[in-house]
Image (cartoon, rainbow, N blue to C red):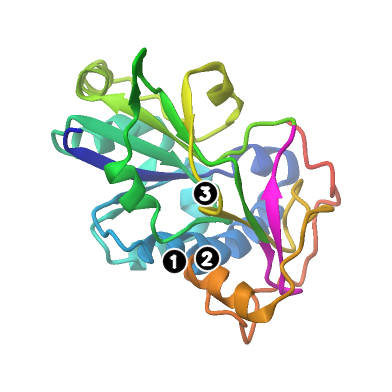
């Protein structure tokens, strides 16, 4: 199977929003979303039963400036601030491995405690070669403000919960050419390649006041409180939560549910 490096990556970028809506709106987004990320997304990675992972928090210049040094307060050498235009530097610091398994994770979503373990042990070669991606297609969606938990999947689009598998040669070639292209943007490209679909229930979508496009939808809801507590505990959520991060501004740029366009 070879030795493996597990890297979680989150794109945290506000450049386009800043250009379209100005610094005040961009600051609202950064303040709220960073707190949500730290409480839910980051905590789900810290909750991994296998602690042998690395986390890249990928920012643009605007996001970095609006964070006002808050990221620097996170004192864990596995969690790295990475500038979008300088990902190759982080790639060169990862060490030498047979495979690099790089996960995409939005800044309001979560992975279950056993994803790192599974990634370390899963077979990702078949008779006709190496899979380019591994992917989870079914999971959960959680809205903390209403304490609703539902099953989650997508019928017509590719769920954004997957990892790109790089061989040592591929990784070395990228960092040697000063061009490291990870998927800190869109996620539909995964369906164009050979991918291995994994078990259900390993991810949870986060729903909150400043979501721009994702909704709970008409999916199967988990009503049993004990079952709900057990499921969310796997993502590092201490349910039932006594409080929830709320914003004085709900959808401040007024574009729900369609989202803002480039």
Query: For residue 230, which quarter of the picture?
Result: bottom right
Of residues 117 and 73, the one nearer the viewer is: 117
Horizontal side of 143 relative to 80 (left or right) equals: right
Considering only vertical position in the picture, is 151 above or below 90? below
Write the residue at 24% across / 31% down: 99
Mark yes or no: residue 80 visible. no
Distance Cα–Cα, label 2 vs label 3: 19 Å
How many residues crowd mark 1 within 10 Å: few (<14), some (14–19), many (20+)? some
Q: Name the residue under label 2.
A: 40
Of residues 249 and 6, the one nearer the viewer is: 6
Q: Mark 3 points at which residue?
A: 63
Write the residue at 50% across / 18% down: 193
**Residue stretch in magenta:** 142-155
Mark yes or no: residue 259 visible. yes
- Of labels 1 and 3, earlier in sequence is 1
Horizontal side of 67 relative to 24 (left or right) equals: left
Secondary-structure class at tag 3: helix
Horizontal side of 108 relative to 28 (left or right) equals: left
Distance Cα–Cα, label 2 vs label 1: 5 Å
- Of labels 2 and 3, earlier in sequence is 2
Q: Are marks 2 and 1 in contact (CB under 8 Å)?
A: yes
Q: Mark 1 points at which residue?
A: 43
Query: For residue 211, which quarter of the picture?
Result: bottom right
Q: Does the magenta stretch include residue 149?
A: yes
């Amino acid at each position: 199977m070879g030795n493996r490096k597990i890297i979680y990556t989150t794109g945290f970028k506000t450049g386009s929003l800043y250009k379209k809506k100005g610094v005040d709106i961009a600051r609202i987004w950064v303040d709220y979303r960073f707190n949500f990320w730290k409480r839910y997304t980051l905590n789900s990675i810290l909750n991994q039963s296998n602690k042998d992972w690395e986390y890249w928090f990928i920012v643009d210049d605007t996001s970095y400036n609006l964070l006002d040094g808050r990221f620097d307060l996170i004192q864990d050498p596995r969690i790295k601030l990475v500038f979008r235009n300088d990902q190759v530097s982080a790639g060169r610091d990862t060490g030498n491995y047979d495979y690099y398994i790089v996960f995409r994770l939005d800044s309001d979503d979560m992975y279950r405690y056993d994803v790192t373990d599974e990634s370390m042990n899963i077979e990702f070669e078949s008779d006709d070669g190496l899979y380019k991606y591994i992917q989870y297609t079914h999971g959960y969606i959680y809205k903390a403000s209403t304490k609703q938990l539902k099953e989650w999947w997508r019928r017509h689009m590719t769920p954004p919960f997957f990892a790109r598998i790089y061989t040592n040669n591929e990784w070395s070639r990228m960092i040697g050419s000063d061009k490291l292209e990870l998927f800190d943007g869109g996620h539909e490209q995964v369906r164009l390649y050979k991918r291995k679909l994994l078990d259900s229930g390993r991810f949870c979508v986060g729903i909150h006041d400043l979501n721009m496009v994702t909704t709970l939808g008409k999916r199967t809801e988990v009503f049993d409180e004990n079952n709900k507590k057990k499921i969310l505990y796997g993502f590092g959520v201490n349910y039932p939560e006594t409080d929830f991060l709320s914003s004085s501004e709900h959808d401040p740029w007024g574009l729900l549910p369609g989202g803002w366009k480039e």
